[in-house]
Amino acid sequence: MSNIRRQSIISSLIIYVGFAVGLLNTYFFTKQGLFTEAEYGLTTIFIAISTMMMAIASLAMPSFIFKFHPYYEDLLPPKKNDMITWALMVCTIGFVLVIVAGYIFKHLVIRKFGANSPELITYYQWIFPMGFGLTIYSVLEAYAWSKHASVLTTFLREVQWRIFTTVLIVLMMLNVIKDFDLFIKLYSFGYPFIAVALLVWLIYKKKIQFTFNISKVSRRYFKHIITLCAFFYGGTFIFTLSQVFDTFVIASVLENGLKLAGIFGFATVVTSIIQAPQRGIVAASITHLSKAWKDKNMPLLQKIYQRSSINQLLFACGVFLLIWMNYSDAINTFGIKPAYLDGAWVFFFLGLTRIVDMGTGVNAQIISTSTRWRFELMSGVILLIIMLPLTYVLTKRIGLNGPAIATLISVTIYNSIRIIFLWKNFKLFPFTIQSLQTVLLAVTCYFICWFAFKSIHGFPGMFGRSIAFILLYGTGAIVLKLSPDILPIIQVIKKRLGIAKK
């Protein structure tokens, strides 16, 4: 657990650096006088569509790497390991098919988005470079995770990609980039940039070799690989569609779709702060989960499951309430366009969704690395059956808040089903009494701080209520010993500061 904890902490810190850069970018996108809400919305939908392209084109190659890497690693010398070669070839072929489909169905995109989001049609072809870069990067990232290089991949995805965007924004502010037309075209090459950077690093460190000879492992497990990829392909597609469908519906159904997509995207970006530890924990634990299943080490699986649950729940509750109590004040104080206040309740419902998803631990990764990995597809189908119609109906009836409410309902049901599945089949359960104590502590601290500072606004109000909440919540977590990882982290910090007891 110490290795998982160390990598998770480092990755989380890197992610927060990335979020800091991302928030700076978001500030420039949303402040007065530089970008319109529709232009910001276009960058948001670029990401959503390229993510969907990646889910289609990757053909479950990341899942193939996660599941079978231990077998390739144990049974083959590095020069005969053909895993990454076939993974990259398959996803490249997959993206060629995406390009063909994109050309064939362009008329459908025009019909669905032309009226409410005409800018998307104008720059439609520029989404494909971004989608291809993200596809290649996702496969290389999965391979790097299996090589215990999760910290680097986290840096590239969370920090380097956002710095690339920052550079473009600064160049536009300096009038080097003359207009948004050139900006969005250069913006589409952000993911190809980090994909090339990761590939160069893997080659330089000699962590990757290419061979076109079919290995004995590929031959032996070929049928199993095809079966797994077929199931996980569907699951990945379903999960990704559930993540981006709300943006598609807003842009196509609501009047001024890209403007509202920008407001929704702003709330989503702020919500993503809550998720900082999640990627780090997943990246650090995936290899250990795969090995634990291979070794039939159920105590380790239960330990990782519960630790990931309480650590993420503790963090998610605290950060969500810290942001929620300052949401409106921050928009007004930092000169962000007032239109983005309309996304306050979007943030609220999406924030609750993040708490539910993170609080249930790494259940998706446990299922996907187990012998019952087919259930990942089944649960994903259930999620899609609930989410898609619910999102469409609530968006039509409620407007901007509809997709966020639909997501909360769907994800809650989705994770509940997976919790029940893991308990009934493997006796694995994420919650303890500390889970309930965490929620009660967070809510109590929130109301204390809200009542104490409700009449104080601007920087004094944000600073006062934030410090008070952090002190109360942090002290309560330590006193109640809500997570077994709290004291080791404190000891590490004391040691680094030179104040640990000898």
Image (tube, rainbow, N blue to C red):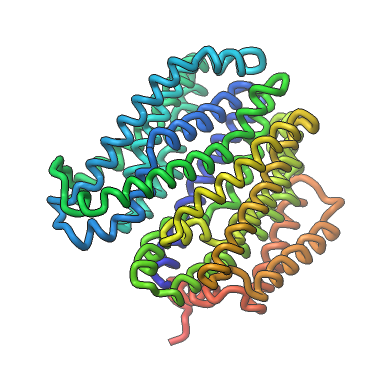
Q: Residue at x 61, y 61 (%)?
A: 359
Q: Quadrant of residue 416?
A: bottom right
Q: Please identify the quadrant where the C terminus is shown.
A: bottom left
Q: Residue at x 79, y 33 (%)?
A: 398
Residue 281 can be seen, yes or no:
no
Question: Measured along the vertical axis of the image, is residue 228 above or below residue 496?
Answer: above
Foreground: 119 or 201? 119
Question: Measured along the vertical axis of the image, is residue 293 above or below residue 154?
Answer: below
How many marks can you see? 0
Q: Residue furthest front?
A: 223
Q: Residue at x 73, y 50 (%)?
A: 324
Foreground: 90 or 175? 90
In the picture, measured across the screen, residue 49 lies left or right of residue 356, that is left
Q: Quadrant of residue 187?
A: top left
Q: Where in the figure is residue 179, as x and y percent of width and height?
A: 51, 15
Q: Residue at x 58, y 70 (%)?
A: 429
Question: Measured along the vertical axis of the image, is residue 181 above or below residue 199?
Answer: above
Q: Where in the figure is residue 190, as x and y percent of width and height?
A: 41, 31
Q: Quadrant of residue 486?
A: bottom right
Q: Where in the figure is residue 289, as x and y percent of width and height?
A: 41, 64
Residue 174 can be seen, yes or no:
yes
Q: Where in the figure is residue 67, as x and y percent of width and height?
A: 35, 55
Question: Measured along the vertical axis of the image, is residue 477 above or below residue 13?
Answer: below
Foreground: 320 or 501? 320
Foreground: 104 or 1? 104
Q: Please identify the quadrant where the N terminus is shown.
A: bottom left
In the picture, measured across the screen, residue 264 lies left or right of residue 396, that is left
